[in-house]
Amino acid sequence: MDLIDGNQIATAIIAELKAEVAAIGGRKPCLALVRVGEDPASISYVKKKEKTAAEIGVTSRVILPPVSITQAELFKLIDDLNADAAVDGILVQSPLPKHIDEVKVFRRVSPDKDVDGFNTINLGKVAQEDDTGFVACTPAGIMELLARSGVDLKGKHVVVLGRSLIVGKPIALLALQKRAGANGTVTVCHSATANLPAITRQADVLIAAIGRPEFVTAEMVKPGAVVIDVGVNRVPDPSKKTGYRLTGDVAFATVARQCAKITPVPGGVGPMTVAMLMKNTVKAFRMQALAARGG
Ligand code: NAP
């Protein structure tokens, strides 16, 4: 079994981006990070994004509205960032407080600055195989992990567990695309899927994104399959300083024994998500520079 090392692959991408940004004369790419309220997981995610941006030479602007911000006020904040020529990418950290409609907020971000790839237009561009858009960072990171680990999806049965807008649906569309590295035959499963193990056992490549700790067991995996574990679940563990341990959607210890390749949690898909956010930010910068030149 080969371990797909997301930390190592993300480090390589970050080094490539650092060299690319160093070669940019004048203003560097700028990423606006909007974090509403004090959700502990969001605090740590935004810190990580800020740190990686700094490492690459991308400027970050962190905006911290209080949890009491209204939807109208948040729209105004996003509108101002959309109009600000010094901002290339905008990320609104999820989850947002319950009184705010997250999907409407994602739609409010200009498609040209939507480095998270959650805007309707950018998801549509994935379906249309139009490279001028932004692919959501986690699915983009999965495709990059597969490519850099020598996994070609052509002719393979790819089974995706989960149909969320941020992972399941876009990764299914990407795997299905008619292009090098993709061309998979894709099945998407969800909570209403009947006889799930019979389907997952047919997968040459199994992508689990359901948010259920160690849901995928060895009996659900075909020997020799490639397994991508997107799940990040906090399981109570009094032996840890934090009081919890992180685990994926796959029962790693037993599944790893029989598959060809697998991503660990942590250290698999997670680091790729941040690397792809930076890649999208540099792309947004380049596209805006081109548009400013009338290209
Ligand atoms: P989500 O929006 O909650 O969607 C979960 C999906 O899984 C839904 O489509 C749901 O089906 C399906 N599902 C739930 N229980 C199921 C079951 N028992 N059998 C079959 N399908 C089931 O989750 P998400 O945002 O896609 O995230 C999924 C996981 O990935 C989470 O653990 C999250 O933390 C992690 N994640 C990691 C990263 C990263 O960077 N590593 C990024 C994003 C998410 P229905 O549609 O029928 O409800």
Image (cartoon, rainbow, N blue to C red):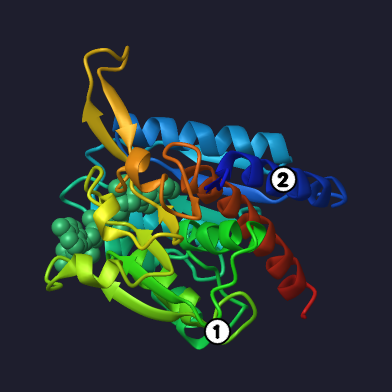
Disc 1 packing (10 Å; few <14; some 14–19; many ≥20): some
Q: Residue, x 23% and y 20% (percent of image)?
A: 237
Q: Residue, x 41% and y 45% (percent of image)?
A: 257
**Compared with residue 283, is residue 180 higher up or lower down, i.e. above or below?**
below
Q: Is residue 260 visible?
A: yes
Mark 2 to mark 1: distance in Å?
A: 26 Å
Q: Position of residue 84 (x, y in %)?
A: 58, 57
**Quarter placement of the C terminus:** bottom right
Element carrying mark 1:
loop
Element carrying mark 2:
helix
Q: Image quadrant of residue 196?
A: bottom left
Disc 2 packing (10 Å; few <14; some 14–19; many ≥20): few
Q: Are marks 2 and 1 in contact (CB under 8 Å)?
A: no
Mark 1 lies on residue: 129
Q: How many marks?
A: 2
Q: Nearer the viewer, residue 191 or 127?
A: 191
Look at label 1 and name its amino acid: Glu
Q: Image quadrant of residue 200?
A: bottom left
Q: Which mark is residue 12?
A: 2
Look at label 2 and name its amino acid: Ala
Q: Image quadrant of residue 201?
A: bottom left
**Compared with residue 72, is residue 132 higher up or lower down, i.e. above or below?**
below
Q: Is residue 231 left or right of residue 243?
A: right
Q: Nearer the viewer, residue 181 or 291?
A: 181
